Image: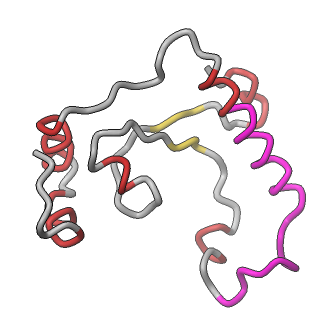
């Protein structure tokens, strides 16, 4: 699906479960989530810190990442098949158990049980 991005090494999609991203709220109700494997650059060093400011934006990386998101969105929207299925509540539970995320789920959502 992301073959056009192969030349910039951004053609790998992961569906790994994690609670360290904005995907958590979707994942716990069974909505498929995806991460495009790209080079992090200094993201983990800079993100949400005092040096995460507009004047430090790397314009080349911003352009590449914007292109990656545009091509990805277009590819997903025009795919002949759905890129993933919605998980049932029991499949969400199995995913949380299998990935060791159930204790974190219990902390984040103590009164909610989708399964």
**In the rendered image of this protein, does residue 76 appear above or below residue 92?**
above
**Relative to 100, residue 73 above or below:** above
Instruction: Say whether residue 68 is magenta.
Output: yes
Between residue 29 and residue 56, name the one nearer to us. Answer: 29
Residue 83's x, y, as percent?
A: 47, 23
Q: Is residue 90 magenta?
A: no
Who is closer to the viewer here, 7 or 27? Answer: 27
Q: Residue at x 78, y 30 (%)?
A: 7
Between residues 23 and 9, which one lies in front from this camera angle?
Answer: 23
Which quarter of the figure has residue 85? top left
From the top left corner, tell me how far across and down residue 61 is, in percent: 81, 56
| Left or right, residue 86 beside residue 110 | right
Q: Main secondary structure of the magenta part?
A: helix
Magenta range is: 50-72
Q: Residue at x 67, y 90 (%)?
A: 50
Q: Position of residue 92 (x, y in %)?
A: 20, 41
Q: In which quadrant is the C terminus drawn?
A: top left
Considering depth in this image, is 66 or 89 the residue closer to the camera?
Answer: 89
Q: Quick check: 28 left or right of 112?
A: right
Q: How many marks?
A: 0
Q: Residue furthest bottom?
A: 50
Residue at 18 percent of width and 55 percent of height? 100
Residue drawn 83% across the image and 70% down it: 57
Q: Where is residue 25? Give x, y as percent.
A: 36, 56
- List the single residue furthest toward the top: 80
Instruction: Report the colour scheme.
Output: secondary structure
Q: Quadrant of the N terminus?
A: top right
In the picture, measured across the screen, residue 44 lies left or right of residue 32, that is right
């Amino acid at each position: 699906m992301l073959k056009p991005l192969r030349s910039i090494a951004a053609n790998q999609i992961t569906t790994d479960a994690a609670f360290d991203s904005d995907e958590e709220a979707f994942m716990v109700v069974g909505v498929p989530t995806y991460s495009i494997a790209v080079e992090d650059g200094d993201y983990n060093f800079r993100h949400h810190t005092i040096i995460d400011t507009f004047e430090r934006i790397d314009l080349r990386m911003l352009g590449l990442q914007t292109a990656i998101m545009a091509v990805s969105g277009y590819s997903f929207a025009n795919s002949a098949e759905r890129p993933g299925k919605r998980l049932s509540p029991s499949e969400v539970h199995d995913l949380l158990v299998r990935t060791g995320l159930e204790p974190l789920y219990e902390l984040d959502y103590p009164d909610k049980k989708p399964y």
